[in-house]
Image (spheres, grey):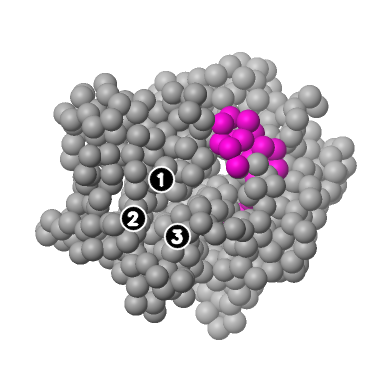
Amino acid sequence: MDYDYIIVGAGSAGCVLANRLTACGTYKVLLLEAGGSDHNLMISMPTALSYPMNTKRFNWWYDTVEEPHLDGRSLHCPRGKVLGGSSSINGMVFVRGHARDFDQWEELGAKGWSYQDCLPYFKRMETWQGGANDYRGGQGPIGVCDGNGMRLNPLYEVFINAGVEAGYRRTDDYNGVEQEGFGPFQMSVDGGVRASTSRSYLRPALKRPNLTVMKKTMVQEILFDGTRATGVKFMQGKALKVAQASREVILSAGSIGSAQLLQLSGIGPAKVLKNAGIAVRHDLPGVGENLQDHLEVYFQHECKEPITLNSKLGLISKALIGIEWLLFKTGLGATNHFESGGFIRSRPEKEWPDIQYHFLPAAMRYDGTAALKGHGYQVHVGPNKPKSRGYVRVKSSNAMDKPEIKFNYLAHEDDIADWRQAIRLTRNILGQNALKPYRGREIQPGATIQSDHDIDAWVRQNVESAYHPSCSCKIGSDEDPMAVLDSQCRVRGFEGLRVIDSSVFPSITNGNLNAPTIMVAEKMSDAILSNSP
């Protein structure tokens, strides 16, 4: 099997690359995916987001080691194992990040990755419901909307009003000129259906004769001729197969999978490889290091008025929602329910926002179960610029063995201080008069959680991953010994080998990660093809 390009992973980045690299008709491309088809109602229906997230058929089902600064808790780390990858199982919240996030990338050694460099690709990837302008795109594959425009529940607007009342600004488009403030939230939903990269990028490309997609394949290692990547060895069923790439092998297996595959191929920290019984091809110490993630808690209140989504969790209500969605692709089935939120600074001296809010007019867990009897509302909150760093490390030479994942959450004292601020600032926002007619008892953290000691203890026991692992194969300068990639996402020390997914971020962005991951793939498709934006 001979191709020009081999892409490992049909996720948020891999599907983009498969589309863009085959569009000209010149190159033969092989796309390998460990999971299966995404043709599933529970993936397509936005309101059903908890189902694919909690289904092993669609999820790699990674877990961290016992995290030492979370009282030894192990946190779940879901990653998509299906066409579309994590874009097929995520919460569909669509956030580019703050402009300064990308300027920071450049400052950290990622030359050519400033916000002005990235903006054309953010625009190219989307069709924004509000139409094209200087910041938004109007002809891209990913449909972006604001759900039901906050029309189906008054609490969305009430939460925004509470934020404004607390002294923060309002922003009507946080992906436009100004991220900071409170306003409607956006989602990757197109015509009432999840706009995954599989649906938006891959399906239109499947009819091209120069694209081959192989599902349920497990790549074992990258093949080399000296320092040039020449192909991959993979399992499909019980058969061991080899595919050759005349131009490039591109890893788009995500922040866990790409680091793991490099290490399985002998590229990574020598000590890690030797401990796993893997021959060292190239001692590249940054592979799997610099791992970052967002944490969040659910801040929950009882609601005095019977207007929340807690009344919609019964079987009859769910059936009616499902029928409307099946027939018309409208209503509560056509939204992720996070239709308002905000971005604020933990301290006035912060250069750009570092705390994010997702508001939900219900009190429930991520698996869709109610958190109380009766009515409630909640806000998901957490600091977005952690200083703690973790790692991904293989434990053996067997590709089927899951790697060791440790984020080292809350290892840095500044992260602990940021969490104290986040809790207190959230209490202030939720205590504003705008919410007074609805505000009942604080369910969690609970009124007794007030001191630094109590807040710290509660956070350690209650934080959950926001499912944004990233930065494990970072772009950086030649002078940075921990940089895995150059500014074109090429693996240092090799030819014909790139990593293109969320692992390439030098630092985590201020927001959800699907949008910047797609942007990275769009930008690198131009780099590979020597195109201009």
| Residue at horizontal 79 percent and vertical 24 percent from the top | 349
Where's residue 450, x and y in %? 68, 22
* Residue span colored magenta: 92-112
Distance Cα–Cα, label 2 vs label 1: 14 Å
In space, the residues marked 3 and 1 are separated at their CA atoms by 12 Å
Relative image position of residue 425 (x, y in whole percent): 75, 31
Q: Is residue 326 above or below residue 179?
A: below
What residue would you read off at disc 2? 247
Picture quadrant where residue 153 is located: bottom right
Q: Earlier in the sequence, mark 3 or mark 1?
A: 3
Q: At numbered mark 3, what does the secondary structure look like: helix, strand or loop?
A: helix
**Residue 273 located left or right of residue 429:** left
Name the kind of residue labelled 2 in the image: Arg
Going from N to C along the chain, the mark reached first, 2 or 1, is 2
Q: Which mark is residue 17?
A: 3
Mark 3 crowdedness (10 Å alpha carbons): few <14, some 14-19, many ≥20: many
Q: Which one is earlier in the sequence, the residue at label 2 or at label 3?
A: 3
In this rendered view, identify the residue nearer to me: 505 or 294.
505
Q: Residues within 10 Å of mark 2 (few under 14, many from 20)?
A: some
Q: Secondary structure at mark 1?
A: strand
User: Which quadrant of the view contains residue 29?
Assistant: bottom left
Q: x and y percent of residue 285 in the render? A: 36, 25
